[in-house]
Image (cartoon, rainbow, N blue to C red):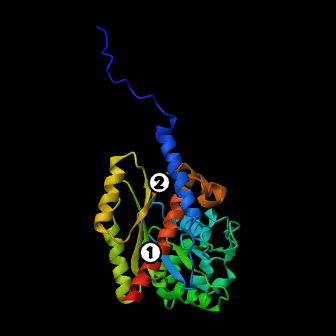
Amino acid sequence: MQESENAISPAPFSIDDSPIARELADLTSRRRALEQVDLQFDGTTRVITVSNQKGGVGKTTTTVNIASALVSVGARVLVIDLDPQGNASTALGVPHTADIPSIYDVLIDEFPLADIIQTSPESERLLCAPSTIHLAGAEIELVTQVAREHRLRTALDDYLSALEEPVDFVLVDCPPSLGLLTINAFTAAQEVMIPIQCEYYALEGLSQLLGSVRMIQKHLNPQLHLSTIVLTMFDARTRLAQQVAEEVRTHFPNEVLRTVIPRSVRVSEAPSFGQTVIAYDGQSAGAIAYREAAVEIVRRAQAEANSEGAS
């Protein structure tokens, strides 16, 4: 049977319509938008604790990459590594062997914070208070210390008040637990940032973490509040990731960033080179996402300040 002359023939495939081409075009557009960003910092220091007792959610990865992304848009940032594993120190290229003065000495022996801070080779505006293996025993040693919950806050207040050039952000990377190290981080901070993995059981344990935040608010630090939730390891190809994102946004509509952090090989590779993904491959999808998240964090706070001023 002869085909009708009016039959619709399939449109020729164009390489420009392929998923890869669309993704590249999207990344190029987002990269150009970031190049136009102009942020101003007023010298106020925001202290943010990054915490989630659930392991493997991208907590340390988020801490160091948000820090580096903030530096890339003009901020001066201090990362305090309170995790005995020292992964944040490694990712920032900062030595943290057992014989190097560290945050352990600040908490236990009352070293000035300025004496242990190192500058990351990534940028002179990116600072790090490293962790060492000694911190693993700090939870037990802190039990008998005077003002054990306020050790970090006192050291940080002294450090910030003596600075000639202000730090715009302090990000504290916590261990995946709710012990005295995390309590010190909560007591020292004004804000809590929670990375949430876009996978099954994402919200597991979150109620306990938020309960701890409320306890710290009531007894130790009334200023503390949950300001930011970052969705990490997002895989747009799976329905599960989209469902998790929708569920988290339903529960926390004002705290969840619009920017989601995709699952990325580059993000996973960067720490093995002692770098953040911003330094390792600043043009990658993961780096662009973290830079967008950093811009959103700054702009949201500025928008809130402006609205409060107007009212």
Write down the residue under mark 2: 262
Circle 2 SS class: strand
Write down the residue under mark 1: 300
Circle 1 SS class: helix
Identify the disc placed on residue 271: none
Up-down: is 121 above or below 189?
Answer: above
- Where residue 20 sits in the image (x, y, percent)? 50, 41
> From where the camera sits, is residue 214 visible?
yes
Q: Residue furthest top?
A: 1
Q: Amino acid at mark 1?
A: Arg
* Left or right, 244 with reference to 49: left
Residue under the point 42% across and 71% down? 228
Look at discs 1 and 2 and give the one toward the viewer: 1
- Where residue 202 sits in the image (x, y, percent)? 35, 59
Which sits in the foreground, 29 or 194?
Answer: 29
- Where residue 190 sits in the image (x, y, percent)? 45, 83
* Left or right, 287 with reference to 301: right
* Left or right, 50 with reference to 202: right
Q: Amino acid at mark 2?
A: Pro
Within 10 Å of the Cα at label 1, are there few (<14), some (14-19), or many (20+) other Cα atoms?
A: some
Image quarter of the C terminus: bottom left
Which sits in the foreground, 105 or 69?
Answer: 69
Q: CA distance from mark 1 to mark 2?
A: 21 Å
> From where the camera sits, is residue 201 visible?
no
Within 10 Å of the Cα at label 2, are there few (<14), some (14-19), or many (20+) other Cα atoms?
A: some
Q: Quadrant of residue 216?
A: bottom left
